[in-house]
């Protein structure tokens, strides 16, 4: 009997007698910290999503990034990161300073990142869309410079699955927090590394050593979520555009960041990089200060005030208390992360209902509400 869905293999071990069975990757398949068929199915689907040659799935996005660092870096290695990368990605790289790794932080633009890359750089990690101010990085420009010096280019494509293909732009590895759009239901943590080359031996061994493989139930939930990724991403992008257009006209809103808006400074780059005119479910906007931002978050009824993004439920977060919490104030200032900044992740609800909730929380006065 052939099941419609791949079963969840809840087993720690597999039979190993005489000649050990070989998985299709050529490693012994005998222990679920190393390989598991449900995980393998998820990896097959993720490989297809990114158009890569091999994939490893992890129990969080940070587990995938940790494994990437540990596998590729050694004493004396230099890492270049945009200063607006996910906070924990930056912190972890900086912590590796105690093992002799050096970190260079660059302003999040392709030119500044390319300039920071030197002959001594071994790893460059960029997020396609920065968080929370939603700058779009021209990855192909960074790839050219990384290739010149022989550095490995890792692209965190968490914010732009489906629409951006990092391998076509010259990435060596793609990482994801599956927790966000890919699993998509705010109920499971996961991460992945997709490789442009079939040789992932070292990464595989580091995952085994770290014990950071995704668990079978989480792998299955992620597989289920992936079935609707395209539908969700389309709807979320449409909702985000409607909300961004509404916010832009709102008298209480100082500024809106959304690369889907035609007059956003990153629209042109996003349009050029993205294969479809979908710009994701995340919109940021600025209110006049901390008191206004906190009052907004307290007044929401439908949109849930919380960290995270990319799921079916709309979420509002306060970057100075979440994504940018550990960022030094001068860096926040340079990037435009103020105490009045709010980040919204729009879900799949009705756009008019979301706008009504947002307008009420802003104290009313919006054009469409
Ligand atoms: N990369 C990006 C762009 C993220 O936004 C996050 C989390 O917010 C991560 C990586 C880390 O993922 P996780 O929370 O699944 O460990």
Image: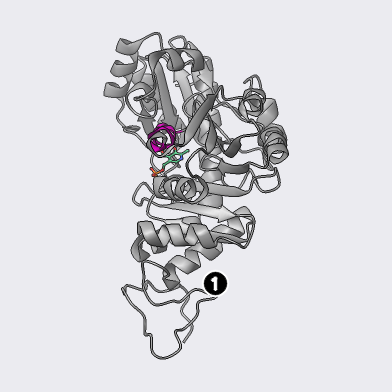
Q: Residue furthest left?
A: 298
- Locate residue 262, reporting x and y percent: 66, 23
Q: In this view, does 109 lie above or below 312?
A: above
Does residue 292 appear left or right of residue 4 in this picture?
left
Badge 1 is on which residue? 25
Q: Is residue 249 visible?
A: yes
- Look at 51% across and 35% down and name the residue there: 239
Q: Is residue 213 visible?
A: no
- The answer to if 239 sits in the magenta stretch is no
Q: Which of 314 and 165 is in front in this view?
A: 165
- Locate residue 95, reporting x and y percent: 38, 35
Q: Is residue 284 above or below residue 168?
A: above
Task: Identify the image quadrant of the C terminus.
Answer: top left
State which image quarter holds ligand 1.
top left
- Locate residue 307, reporting x and y percent: 34, 34
Q: Give the range drawn in magenta.
A: 86-96
Q: Residue furthest bottom?
A: 18
- Secondary structure at numbered mark 1: loop
Q: Nearer the viewer, residue 229 or 301?
A: 229
- Locate residue 47, reporting x and y percent: 58, 59
- The answer to if 94 sits in the magenta stretch is yes
- Look at 35% across and 25% down and name the residue there: 326
Q: How would you classify the magenta stretch by its main secondary structure?
A: helix
Q: Is residue 244 above or below residue 170?
A: above
Instruction: Confirm or reject: label 1 Cβ below 8 Å from ligand 1.
Output: no
Q: Please rate how many residues cluster around mark 1, counting C-alpha atoms within 10 Å: few if below 14, some from 14 to 19, many from 20.
A: some
Q: Nearer the viewer, residue 13 or 101?
A: 101
Q: How many marks?
A: 1
Asked where in the image residue 346 lies, by quadrant, the reply is top left
- Look at 40% across and 64% down and name the residue there: 220
Does residue 219 appear left or right of residue 78 in this picture?
left
């Amino acid at each position: 009997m052939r099941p419609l869905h791949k079963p969840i293999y809840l087993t720690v071990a597999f039979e190993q007698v005489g000649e050990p069975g070989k998985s299709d990757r050529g490693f012994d398949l005998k222990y679920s910290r190393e390989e598991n068929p449900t995980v393998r199915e998820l990896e097959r689907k993720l490989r297809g999503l990114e158009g890569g040659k091999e994939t490893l799935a992890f129990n969080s996005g940070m587990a995938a990034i940790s494994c990437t660092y540990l596998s590729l870096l050694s004493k004396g290695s230099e890492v270049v990161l945009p200063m607006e990368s996910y906070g924990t990605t930056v912190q972890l790289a900086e912590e590796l300073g105690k093992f002799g790794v050096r970190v260079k932080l660059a302003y999040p633009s392709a030119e500044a990142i390319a300039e920071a890359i030197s002959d001594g750089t071994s790893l460059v990690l960029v997020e396609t869309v920065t968080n929370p101010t939603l700058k779009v990085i021209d990855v192909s420009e960074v790839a050219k410079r990384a290739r010149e010096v022989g550095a490995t280019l890792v692209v965190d494509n968490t914010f732009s699955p489906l629409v951006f293909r990092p391998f076509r732009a010259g990435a060596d590895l793609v990482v994801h927090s599956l927790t966000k759009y890919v699993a998509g239901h705010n109920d499971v943590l996961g991460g992945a590394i997709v490789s442009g080359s079939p040789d992932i031996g070292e990464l595989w061994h580091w995952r085994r050593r770290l014990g950071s493989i995704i668990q079978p139930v989480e792998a299955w939930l992620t597989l289920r979520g992936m079935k609707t990724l395209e539908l969700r991403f389309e709807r979320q992008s449409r909702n985000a555009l409607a909300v961004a257009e509404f916010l832009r006209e709102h008298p209480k809103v100082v500024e809106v960041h959304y690369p889907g808006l035609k007059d956003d400074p990153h629209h042109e780059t996003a349009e050029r990089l993205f294969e479809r005119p979908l710009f994701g479910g995340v919109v940021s906007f600025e209110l006049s200060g901390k008191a206004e931002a906190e009052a907004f978050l307290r007044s929401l009824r439908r949109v849930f005030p919380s960290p995270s993004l990319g799921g079916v439920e709309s979420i509002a977060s306060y970057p100075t208390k979440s994504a940018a919490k550990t960022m030094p104030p001068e860096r926040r200032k340079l990037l435009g992360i103020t105490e009045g900044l709010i980040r919204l992740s729009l879900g799949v609800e009705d756009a008019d209902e979301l706008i009504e909730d947002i307008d009420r929380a802003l104290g009313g006065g919006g054009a469409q509400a």
